[in-house]
Amino acid sequence: MNKSDIPRLFSEFLKQYDPEEKDTIWASHSEKFRRFWKERVLAGPSGDLPEAEIDEIVRILDRNAKGNTRDSEAVARAMIAQGAWRRMFNELHSDKELSGIITRIFEENDEEIKAKYINQLYEMNQGRKNNLTGPSANAINAFLAAYDPVHTGTIISLGDRQKLIEQFGFPHGFDFETSSIGEKVVKSNKAILAGLRSLGIDGTARTITRFCYYPEMKALWKMEHTVKREDKDVAVTVPMDTEAEEPEVDLQEEIRESLHIQALLADIGSRMGMKIWIPKADRSSVLKLWKGSEDNLLERLPLNYDTTTLKTIEQIDVLWLNKRSIVRAFEIEHTTSVYSGILRMADLLALQPNMKIKLHIVAPPAKRDKVFQEIRRPVFSLLESGPLAETCSYISYDSLRDLAKEKHLEHLSDSVLDDYAEAVESD
């Protein structure tokens, strides 16, 4: 299959996608987003915005937002936790300089000036951990798509845009490695829309880029494959071997940071009233860093499993237990390969396919994309219990530190963690 097949795929796509109906929905979504931005973010009373109002807008921006279903119309999977969205909007509400430059980005039609404003936003936001200006530009691209879905596509990741442009050889007039973030955001959107329209694909930017995620079309550019199971189709990825291109890191420093994260997880769970399990090999190091009470630390696991299962469970970096039940399990990935923790989680589900616990991979933000790639390998996607991505989510170090700052952890349930976790799913 090649580019000449794309018009045929678009005709098939239109059999299950009604552009007129969807464009009507997006006209309403865009108007709602614009009104919220003008009347609540830019104006409105001081202090935090109501969470319910933020969440309504997040449901437009992020398919993973709380309250969305498979049939919900949202920009894309933004890979930003619910709690991070809330904090981002509250910061934009309180910092008028930051929200002001985004307003100029929204309203500017000249491509060069729009790119300049995006660069200014990144400079202004440098050093702030608010998920607004990451290297993939997910947040700003989601904002732009919600503000103007007619002219801005909903492929929000610059990484995905690069794959599509390079796979189909679309002219783009910039360099993904050396160009500014603003130039990449503006010109990649233009290149994708122009490239697909040159092949006969027509419609609004939303329609055109939604087509890019039609399974047969997505397989052409994203190197993603669908495996048909008896119960459902499962999308899998086979990551390229890029280990040699990874930057050198200070392994001892990463290990030390992972121990701090292990201690932080223990402290958060303990404050919530959970019993905590830490592998015996890590215990002495973690206890030197754990600032909270150690009364809830378990000496042995109160579980009735076979020896192989117990040995697997005992090696998981941190467990939260309520009485005799595991509530949450955490693996901290500090290595370049990010294999070990994911393998242990998969081993656990392979041994106990009916086990119903929430699993989390905790890793630095720089390793997020790698975690997403690896967790959707065929070996993890075709488990008897179902795809590991449906059970196991990602939490960044930064999000975990934000959770630790919650004032009333003692009165919260473990479900608050879902506001800080990111689901590992395909678009």
Image (tube, rainbow, N blue to C red):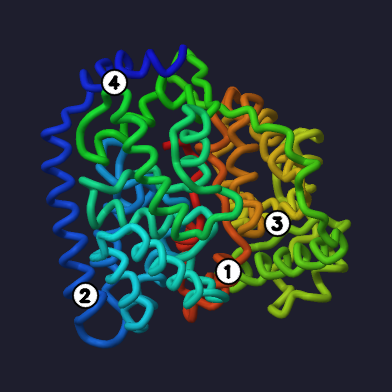
Displayed quadrant of residue 365: bottom right
Q: Nearer the viewer, mark 4 or mark 2?
A: 4
Q: Position of residue 329 (x, y in %)?
A: 64, 51
Q: Which residue is mark 4?
A: 10
Mark 3 lies on a secondary structure that is strand
Is residue 71 shown left or right of residue 82?
left
Which of the two discs, 1 and 4, sits closer to the camera? 4
In which quarter of the view is residue 55 placed?
bottom left
Q: Amino acid at mark 1?
A: Gly
- Residue mark closest to the camera, 1 vs 2: 2
In this view, the residue in front, 266 or 241, is 241
Query: In the rendered image, which residue does mark 1 sit on?
Result: 273
Q: CA distance from mark 4 to mark 2?
A: 39 Å
Q: Earlier in the sequence, mark 3 or mark 2?
A: 2
Amino acid type, label 3: Val
- Measure the alpha-carbon separation of dots 1 and 4: 53 Å
Determine contact: label 1, label 2, CB under 8 Å. Answer: no
Q: Nearer the viewer, mark 3 or mark 1?
A: 3
What's the mark number on residue 40? 2
Q: Nearer the viewer, residue 179 or 98?
A: 179
How far apart, in angstroms, are the residues tagged by discs 3 and 1?
A: 15 Å
Q: Say which label, 3 or 4, has the lower sequence index.
A: 4
The amino acid on which the numbered mark 2 sits, given as a three-letter code, is: Arg
Mark 4 / mark 2, whichever is N-terminal? 4
Q: Secondary structure at mark 1?
A: loop
* Camera-nearest label, 3 or 2: 2
- Identify which residue is drawn at 76% across, 48% down: 246
For disc 2, the neighbor class at 10 Å (few under 14, some 14 to 19, many from 20) is some
Question: Which numbered disc flags the more N-terminal residue, 3 or 1?
Answer: 1
Residue located beneath label 3 in the image:
318
Q: Is residue 372 visible?
A: yes
